[in-house]
Image: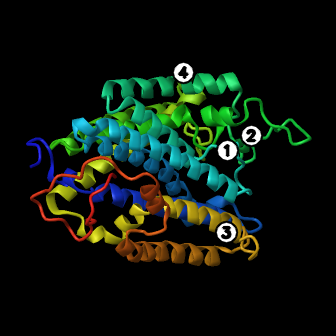
Amino acid sequence: MTNRDESPTTARRIDSFDLLRGVAVLLMMEQHLGVWLWRGPAPGHRITDYPVLLGINILGGGAAPAFLMLAGVGAALFLGRAERSSLRAARRVLGTRGVTILLFGYLLSLLTPSWFTLRSWYVLHLIGLSQLVIALFGRRGVLLATVCVAVLAATPWVQGLLGTPAHLTNLRMTGADPMSTTGGVLRGGHLRLALAEGQFPILPWFAIFGWGAICGAVVPQTRAPRRLAVWGGVLALVGGAMVVSYHVLRLPLALSHPRIFKLNIPFFPCTPAFILLMGGALAVVMAALLARERKAGLRWAGPLCSLGRCSLSALIVHVVVFRELVRPLGLWQACDVTTASAILLGTLVGSMWIAHRWRRIQFRYGAEWLLRRAVPSESPPASTSRRPPSPTTDKRAGAN
C-alpha cells in the first residue's frame, strides 16, 4: 500500500531522474570531447566563428550541476524509502557509499595524471562527501536549507580571504603555486582545494547538492511537481536577477561584489548567482518531467534512462579514455572540426547503445555494480505499486 499523499512513481525507480542523468552524461561528454579533441580555431579565426562547438560547450556547463543536484535527490529518496525502524541502517549505508564514491574520486585522480593530482577535488569527491553529510543530517529540511544558505554566504568571503583568482586554470586547481618556480604547492594543499579552489569545492557546490536533497524529500508527495516548479522558479528568478544586475544593468552594488553576482564562464571559481540560477532551472525541469512521467510515462526515453543508470561508469571511463588514452594515438587537441564532431557524435550515440544493452545484465562490473556489491542496501524493498511498470523501469527498485 502506498501512502495516500504519495505518488505511485515513488514506489519504484523514477525515470525522470535517470533521464536527466543521461542528458547530463551527454552534455558532459560533448563538452569534454570538444575541448580535448579539437585543435582550436584556424589561423585568423576566433572561437565565436564556430557557433556550434561554442554552443555545445556552453550547454555542457549544465552537466555538473545536474549530477550534483540529482545525487542530492537520490540521497533523500534513498533515506525516504527506509522504514522508520531501519532509517539508521539506511543512513549507515548512505554514508558508506559516500566513502566509496570518495575513493572512486581519488582513483580517478590517479588514473588521470594529465588533469589531476591527489590534491585535486573533483565532482566525485564532492558527491562522496555530500552523501556523508546527508547521512549525518538525515532529511531535516530546515537544517539543510540553513546549511545551504550558510555555504553560499561563506563562499565569496572565503574566496576573498584566500585571494582566489577571478579565473582558475587547471594547473591552479591541482594546488600548484603560480608564483613558485620550483613546482611549489599552495598553502593548504588538498584542504584548500576541497574547501574553495578545486574544480567542485564544498563552497559553494555543496549548496546545489543540499538543494537536491531538499527537493528529493518532497518528491514522494502527490503535489511535488507543482511545489518543485514554484520553488525552482523563485530560485531561478533570484539567481537570474543577480546575473542581470551584474552583466546587463551594471549596478554598482553588483559590480563591487563580482564574487557574488558575476557569471563566470567557465565557472571556475563558481559564484552563488550561478548556483541559484542553475538550481532553480533544474528544479523546474525536474518538475516538468516528473509531471509528465506521472501522467503518461516516459517510454520513449529508454536509451537515455539506461545511460543515466550507469552515469558513474560513464564519467570515469570517458575521462580516462579521452583525457589519457587518446594522447598516444595523436588525437589530443589535434582534430579539425569535422573529425572532432564525428568522433563526438559517434561517442554519444555509441554510449547510449552500449548502456541500453548493458542494462540487460544490470551493468555488471561497472562502477555502479561495484558500489552495490561493496555496500549492499540494508533498506527495505520498495512497496509494490498498483501502477504497472513501464518498459524503461528496471525490474529491481533502487535508490535514485
> CA–CA distance between discs 1 and 3?
23 Å
Task: Determine if residue 253 is in view.
Answer: yes
> CA–CA distance between discs 2 and 4?
32 Å
- Residue occupied by mark 1: 120
- Residue occupied by mark 3: 37
Q: Earlier in the sequence, mark 3 or mark 2?
A: 3
**Amino acid carrying mark 2 in the image:** Gly
Q: Secondary structure at mark 2?
A: loop
Residue 35 as seen in the image, left or right of residue 18: right
> CA–CA distance between discs 1 and 4?
34 Å
Residue 257 as seen in the image, left or right of residue 215: right
Q: Earlier in the sequence, mark 2 or mark 4?
A: 2
Task: Using the image, tell me which numbered label, if any, was put on residue 29.
Answer: none
Instruction: Please name which of the two marks, 4 or 3, marks the residue nearer to the observer.
Output: 3
Residue at 19 percent of width and 52 percent of height: 11
Instruction: Please name which of the two marks, 2 or 4, marks the residue nearer to the observer.
Output: 2
Q: Earlier in the sequence, mark 1 or mark 3?
A: 3
Picture coordinates of residue 348 (x, y %)?
49, 72
- Residue occupied by mark 2: 175
Q: Is residue 125 above or below residue 45?
A: above
Residue 203, image quadrant:
top right
